[in-house]
Image (cartoon, rainbow, N blue to C red):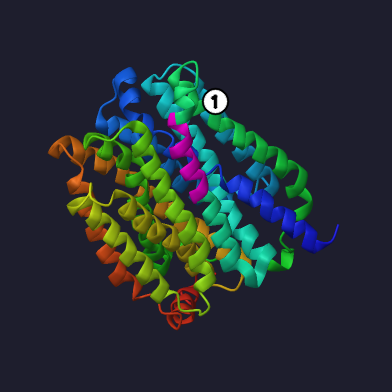
Amino acid sequence: MSLKIKNGLMLLVLVLVGLNMRPLLTSVGPLLPQLRDASGMSFALASLLTALPVVAMGIMALAGEWLSHHLNEHKTVALSLVTIAAGALLRELAPHSTLLLSSALIGGIGIGLIQATIPGIIKRLFGHSTPAVMGLWSAALMGGGGLGAAATPWLAQHSEVWFHALAWWSLPAILALIGWMVIGQSAIRPPSKALSAPRVRLHVSPRVWLLGLYFGLINGGYTSLVAWLPPYYMQLGSTPQSSGSLLALLTLGQTAGALLTPMLARHQDRRRLLLIALMMQLVGFCGFIWLPQQLPVGWALICGVGLGGTFPLSLVLALEHSSHAPLAARLVAFMQGIGFIIAGVSPYLSGFLRSATGDYLADWIFHAACVAGLMLLTLRFAPSRYPSEWQAASHQKII
């Protein structure tokens, strides 16, 4: 089989794997009122159903380098898909708070391992096509989130017991596992020993922490919307199906943004596109604050395109800090580790604000302010500063 055909099949498998990265999070929001009634969970505790997997993603991304010494990339992704399927299947049982939180944690561990592994594979296999492939991978993530939000209420209506709808999301994980076992082993070329990453202590570089904060605040807006956008519109009088569809439209916008934005990134300086995407997020959050019932579809799509555009661009931004593939993969894993831990706190903070104020406006205002701060932070990511800042870190006896 030629390398071109292998890479083509690998792209299909990557899409299938990517579709499993978000339904564990997005399937909860449309059923949250029923889950809270059945389990007795408070708003703050219910927020952990989104927060726990995201924090687990961060922790596993930070542990990814240590795990890579014990498991190769193929085994890591395969084991992670098994873990995601197990987390979803656990929701087949009664909607008890302990079981629900355990399923969120187990699934989050699997998602975190995959998200820390795939960017390095893409950087190594697809080289100069990295932005486009990263966009495709990100679009698959967002598309899976949309499926989780839109299909779960329908599955609940057509399941013998409503909460069994949450367990159906083990099926795509099993299908992805089969595809990965058939294609992944032959398509992945192990890193050359000559390409082993320099021993750079990333945690001492201010730039790496800045990237982690940037990635975390971007994804914090997403995790809060996943957790609370459907309940917000249900509080305004929408049905679970229509509020879940609104979240699906948000993720449809994300999918479009993730696909299109990297294709427009023809120059190494990513700041202009990042600023445009962040401005779209700001418009969306302001719409949710001031005109939520006038143009809900418009606000969801605009905000979604902005969120979808910033996700792959921020990954590419980190990858481009080093042309050395293994080092770039370590950098992205560390950035995701810090970022997802920050993003995981966001739904919990949102739940706290909801309990304290009685509505969700304080949360949307908080995220609108974060987006404004991110726009200022974006200006610091000039490509001309990558080599100088990285070189400065390398000279501090950290290699």
Say whether residue 200 is visible: yes
Main secondary-structure element of the magenta-colored stretch: helix
Asked whether, in this view, residue 17 is left or right of residue 316, the answer is: right
| Image quadrant where one finds the C terminus | bottom right
User: Can you identify the residue that label 1 sits on?
Assistant: 89
* Crowd class of label 1 (few under 14; some 14 to 19; many from 20; radius 10 Å): some
In the rendered image, the residue lying farthest to the bottom is: 384
Asked whether, in this view, residue 137 is left or right of residue 104, the answer is: right
Q: Position of residue 103 (x, y in %)?
A: 47, 29
User: Is 143 in the magenta?
Assistant: yes
User: Is 237 in the magenta?
Assistant: no
Which image quadrant for residue 4? bottom right
Closer to the camera, 13 or 304? 304
In the rendered image, the residue lying farthest to the front is: 294
Asked whether, in this view, residue 179 is left or right of residue 133, the answer is: right
The three-letter amino acid code for the residue at tag 1 is Leu
Q: Which residue shows up at 45% across the image and 48% down it?
A: 58
Q: Which residue shows up at 57% across the image and 55% down it?
A: 137
Q: Position of residue 132 (x, y in %)?
A: 58, 66
Magenta residues, as a range? 142-153
Mark 1 residue element? helix
Q: Position of residue 339 (x, y in %)?
A: 40, 54
| Image quadrant where one finds the N terminus | bottom right
Q: Which residue shows up at 40% across the image and 41% down it?
A: 245
